[in-house]
Amino acid sequence: MTLKVTQETFDSLTDEWRTLAEACHAPVFATPAWLRTWWDSCRSTEELMLLAFREGNEAKGIAPLMRIDDTIRFIAYSDICDYHDFPFSGIGGGEFYTSLLDELDRTAWRSLELDGLTEDSPTLQALPELAKGRGWSVDVALEEVSPRIPVQPTWEEYQNALGKKDRHELRRKLRRLGAAGDINYYNVTNPRSGDVADVLTLLKASREAKAAFLTPEKERFFHNLAESMAEQNHLKLFFLELDGVRVAASFCFDYKKGYYLYNSGYDVHYAQLSVGLLLKALCLKSAIEDGKEVFDLLRGSESYKYHLGAQDYGVHRLTIQR
């Protein structure tokens, strides 16, 4: 089968793209709502290279790419986008990737840099050998780990699956928090601007690196992302309150079979109560109650992730040069 390739815009492709992303392996970061928010909020000199691979008039696959000089890469950079991939459905992977390389072969470029590919990505499994078959050089490198927690059927089973020390510490900290005052834990799925502002305030308060990262441009991006994800029913902002004061917050995505902890922060004045760690544990409790299969803590090997029972999951960069 020969797939027809069309150059698209976000407006022309969004509906088909959303359907494909829902039907296949693609992560939440490869949805049109996520990437369009980045494109509208953060792009500078990048040139959009959004391709649809069609059987007749029906899109069977999408390549959400952009060009910077002689380099082609996924839309959005890894400082703010944890995972990437190509959404496709209804066709074989070999067929899609061969069509993709055929199209790229007709395009001027020097380097194809595909970061954010998870260890089980079909792109990582198929594309390197196909590219080598064309005489192109290929490099695959581990970028980072992205720890994940397999979700147990119940909160009690989750705690029992932890190591003895981590289980004891979690329960002790929860008891201490409960004794500190009036505790309220909840999530917001349709936030007002003040909710997002509170999340960002707590992010900046928790670490100097996060305060430096959250430039005015990045803050606008977070506000826009919250709005676009809420419209798609993929947003959960979690808050932990102590005596009516928001002391910790987590910015999460609810997508397919998992929760994805995109960012989080807390008021350092309450650090002795471990409010940041405990909010993450309570987010996991919500994932259990919602029947999810995974709680993804995303990029970074911070120690708290392993205390909560996370297991490393590789994120790779595939670089192809010709």
Image (cartoon, rainbow, N blue to C red):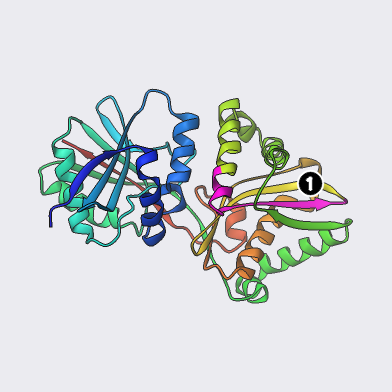
Q: Position of residue 309 (x, y in %)?
A: 58, 64
46 in relation to 102, above or below: above
For image coordinates 55% across by 34% down, the residue present is 221
Is 86 drawn above or below residue 223 in the view shown? below
Tell me the residue at 23%/58% (across/down): 93
| x then y, percent, for residue 86 | 32, 50
Say what secondary structure mark 1 lies in.
Answer: strand
Spot occupied by residue 321 in the image (x, y as percentages of width and height): 20, 36
Q: Which residue is mark 1?
A: 246
Q: Tell me which segment is drawn in magenta.
A: 228-243
Q: Around disc 1, counting alpha carbons within 10 Å, would you say few (fewer than 14), some (14 to 19), or many (20 or more)?
A: some
Residue at (41, 52) in percent of width and height: 18
Is 237 magenta? The answer is yes
In the image, is 272 to the left or to the right of 63?
Answer: right
Q: Which quadrant, please, contains the C terminus?
A: top left
Please tell me how many numbered marks the rendered image carries.
Answer: 1
